[in-house]
Amino acid sequence: NQPIKDVTLAPFYEDGKLTGYRFTRLGNEAPIKVLGFERGDIIRRINGEEVSNPQPLFEMVNKVGEIEAVSIDIIRNNEKKTIFVEIQ
């Protein structure tokens, strides 16, 4: 499965609590890069829902070509950001 092959996620903890997942590898050919992610980004929420396990992330990676719109809250360089993508 090529989309997942180019992406590696690692759990991210704050004060011993799982608070998201960090892109530790994001290959140049990873289709998910079209959503604006960068290596090191920490995904905190997808469409307002906290990410408490990696399943929603892998579903998003696998369905990147089918997504119509998605809102993703991330931490990048210690700053909170929201990536909103609408694909037409």
Image (cartoon, rainbow, N blue to C red):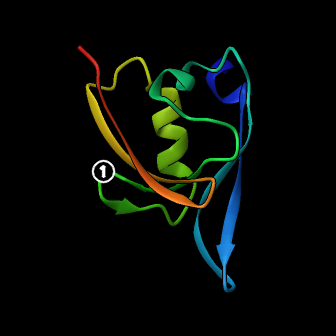
Q: Residue furthest bottom?
A: 15
Image coordinates for residue 46, horizontal then vertical, percent: 38, 51
Q: Residue 67: percent from the left, percent from the top?
A: 33, 26
Q: Which of the 4 image quarters holds residue 17?
A: bottom right
- Report which quarter residue 71 is drawn in: top left
> What residue would you read off at disc 1?
47
Is the N terminus in the top left, top right, bottom left or bottom right quadrant? top right
- Is the C terminus in the top left, top right, bottom left or bottom right quadrant? top left
Query: Pointer 1: residues within 10 angstroms few (<14), some, or many (20+)?
Result: few
Residue shown at the point (49%, 30%) measured from the top left:
36
**Residue drawn 67% across and 18% down?**
2
Residue depicted at 73% across the width and 24% down the height: 27
x, y percentage for residue 22? 66, 52
Query: So how many labels did they put on this image?
Result: 1
- Residue 40 in the figure: left or right of residue 80: right
Describe the element under mark 1 as helix, strand or loop.
Answer: loop
Decide: is 3 above or below 73.
above
Q: Is residue 79 above or below residue 1?
A: below
Residue at the location (51% across, 28% down)?
62
Q: Nearer the viewer, residue 86 or 78?
A: 78
Question: What amino acid is at disc 1?
Answer: Asn
